[in-house]
Image: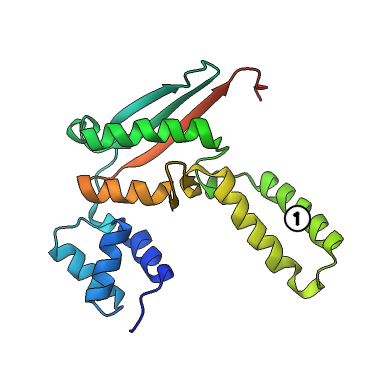
């Protein structure tokens, strides 16, 4: 294969949990062959997700309060061992994630956490928008799916571009941390509070 596409890299990252740069390098060495790339990653000592059967029962809860005192965040990040939870890498990730949540205002953790009702409501809004724009009927559904995907990148924490580096999404940073620590790391839940915000 002459060129390694970003989709190839993302697919390998999703299947292995190894960082983007490592996946790209392995695919390049393997001439685009995903199975060979997985073998290369294992030979290099990268622990693939398929081999991580330990439960993430340790971790830490990180708190962040904006200097104005008007926005606060709690986030739970889980891992396998207290050794990882207390490492500088892990603590920095949890701290930066809490700050990201304060700034980016995610409503959900991941797309699968969005309720069916919320998805249908969004689709209905997009359908009305598309009808007003006078788009051909045969491409309406495709446009709606595209806008729904954009909604996930705005509303779901793991799909959001990271505020300190918008070229990367939060789940990429998480995968890189898994790769560096060799642990199964999960963002379990978060809560964001803002003065004057209505509590649902």
Q: Quadrant of the N terminus?
A: bottom left
Residue placed most toward the observer, 53 or 173: 173
**For residue 175, above or below residue 15:** above
**Is disc 1 placed on a helix, strand or loop?**
helix
Q: Is residue 131 above or below residue 158?
A: below
In the picture shown, does residue 74 fall above or below 164?
above
Image-based side of 144 in relation to 93, left or right: right
Q: Position of residue 158 (x, y in %)?
A: 46, 46
Please tell me which residue is depicted at 27% across the width and 58% down the height of the picture: 50
Q: How is the image coloured?
A: rainbow
Q: Which image quadrant is residue 90 in?
A: top left
Mark 1: few/some/many CA within 10 Å (<14, 14-19, 20+): many
Quarter placement of the C terminus: top right
Residue 73: percent from left, percent from top? 47, 25
Q: Residue at x 17, y 63 (%)?
A: 42
Give the residue drawn at x 68%, y 68%: 142
Callout count: 1
Q: Is residue 175 left or right of residue 192?
A: left
Whether residue 58 is visible here, answered yes or no, is: no
Residue found farthest to the top: 69
- Mark 1 sits on what residue? 126
Residue 92: quadrant of the picture: top left
Q: Nearer the viewer, residue 192 or 59?
A: 192
Position of residue 76 measured from the top left corner of the image (x, y, whole percent): 39, 30
Q: Residue at x 55, y 38 (%)?
A: 106
Where residue 75 sits, quadrant-wise, is top left
Whole-percent x, y for residue 91 in the image: 28, 31
In this rendering, does residue 112 appear at all?
Answer: yes
């Amino acid at each position: 294969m002459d060129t390694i596409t970003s989709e190839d890299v993302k697919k390998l990252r999703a299947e292995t949990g190894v960082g983007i740069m490592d996946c790209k390098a392995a695919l390049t060495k393997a001439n685009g062959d995903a199975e060979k790339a997985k073998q290369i990653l294992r030979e290099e000592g990268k622990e693939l997700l398929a081999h991580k059967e330990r439960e993430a029962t340790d971790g830490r809860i990180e708190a962040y309060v904006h200097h104005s005192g008007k926005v606060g965040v709690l986030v739970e990040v889980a891992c396998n061992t207290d050794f990882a939870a207390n490492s500088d890498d892990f603590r920095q990730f949890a701290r930066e994630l809490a700050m990201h949540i304060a700034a980016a205002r995610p409503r959900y953790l991941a797309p699968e956490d969005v309720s069916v009702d919320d998805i249908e409501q969004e689709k209905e809004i997009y359908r009305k928008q598309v009808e007003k724009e006078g788009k051909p009927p045969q491409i309406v559904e495709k446009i709606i799916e595209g806008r729904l995907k954009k909604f996930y990148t705005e509303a779901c924490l793991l799909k959001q571009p990271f505020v300190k580096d918008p070229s990367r999404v939060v789940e990429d940073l998480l995968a890189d941390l898994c790769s560096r620590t060799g642990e199964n790391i999960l963002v379990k839940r978060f809560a964001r509070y803002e003065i004057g915000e209505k509590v649902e």
